[in-house]
Image (cartoon, rainbow, N blue to C red):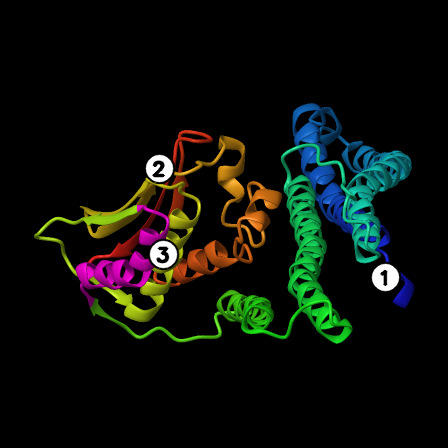
Amino acid sequence: MKYIRARLGLKLFLSYLAVLLVGVSVIWVATQITTPRAYARHLAFMESQMGTGFMNGQGQGQGQGQGHGMVADFYENFQASFNEALLISVFAAAVIAVVVSWLLSRNIVSPVQAIMSASQRISEGHYDERVNSRGMDEIAQLAARFNQMASQLEQVETMRRQLIGDVTHELRTPLTSIKGYMEGLVDGVLPANAETFNQIHHEADRLSRLVDDLQELSRVEAHAYSLDVRSVSVSSLVQTTLKRLSPQATAKRITLRSNLPNDLSHVHADEDRITQVLVNLAANAVQYTPEDGEVLISASQHGNELYISVKDSGIGIPQEHLKNIFTRFYRVDKSRSRQSGGGSGIGLTIARHIVEAHGGRIWVESAGEGLGSTFTFSLKVS
């Protein structure tokens, strides 16, 4: 019984065979019950049509007795021939049904076995494993869903490996700098003055920001934080952002300004979290905009949503990179980003999670490299 329970194909085959046996049994019992009555009824009808000669004169009793004997013999022969034909038919049907049941069960079990084998391969780390999905039935849909799951697992594994590599690189860079400065101080190559200590402090601060960003990313991805949602003025959010980033924009001779309608509605949001999103987008815009450029923060209402946009005249984003721009540690140009003192590459990922936690959306538009970009996110109107 355990062997049968562990084999789907055998269970399907036995189920088909059980259905066949039940059908044959019903046919056999039904014919044995109905055949005598049907035969007697039809024979009585024939006697009423043809047996009037046996009912006349003195030979009526003798002819009637002989007729009943012949009828009984005829019925026995008929019953024997009928049962013989029925047995042959049942045997032929059973053989054909067994073959068809085996073929059908194998046809159903084969893709399931393929999925089982592929799942075993995936569990061993071979995420490129796929199964053939032909047809439109439930098994084909299961295979298609399995392939979709395998693709997502492969993508997650690729991102995991890339994450480890990126984190390792980001941690190694400031640690290498700190180690170099300390070795220079020990060997007497570097002077023990304020400039050297400031450089060490700068690298340590960079390392601390990366650790904080990683901790923040893990919290937002796990939704391990609460939102203090209330009615918030967008104007106050924008003004806070402008005050925080004005010194940085002024140092690069970048015009940082806002353009907001006077009758702008309030939004339902956590003020601190949305300020974090807006500061992140504006800081990126200032960072990747060359001198004498412009960064504009604007807002517009669309139905029950408010769109807040950060537009810059910076380096722009090629079209092939737009869909991945919110992926953690993703950079359009890694070498340029690191040379220019770029962040960890997870700020936009954190922003996306925060906006989605508010029930909004975030996206980016760019006409191409060197033509600037516009980051926009939506919030529900209060």
For residue 369, the mark is none
Q: Nearer the viewer, mark 2 or mark 3?
A: 3
Instruction: Locate the C terminus by quadrant.
Output: bottom left
* Residue type of the residue flagged with mark 3: Gln
| Residue 257 sits above or below residue 38 on the image | below
For residue 313, the mark is 2
Q: Locate residue 29, reporting x and y percent.
A: 77, 50
* Residue type of the residue flagged with mark 1: Ala
For disc 1, the neighbor class at 10 Å (few under 14, some 14 to 19, many from 20) is few
Along the line of sight, which residue is nearer the eye, 35 or 100? 100
Instruction: Name the residue located 49 percent from the left edge and 56 percent from the top edge.
Output: 349
Q: Which residue is mark 1?
A: 6
Q: Locate residue 112, reporting x and y percent.
A: 78, 47
For residue 248, the mark is 3
Q: Locate residue 371, reporting x and y percent.
A: 39, 31
| Range shown magenta | 232-254
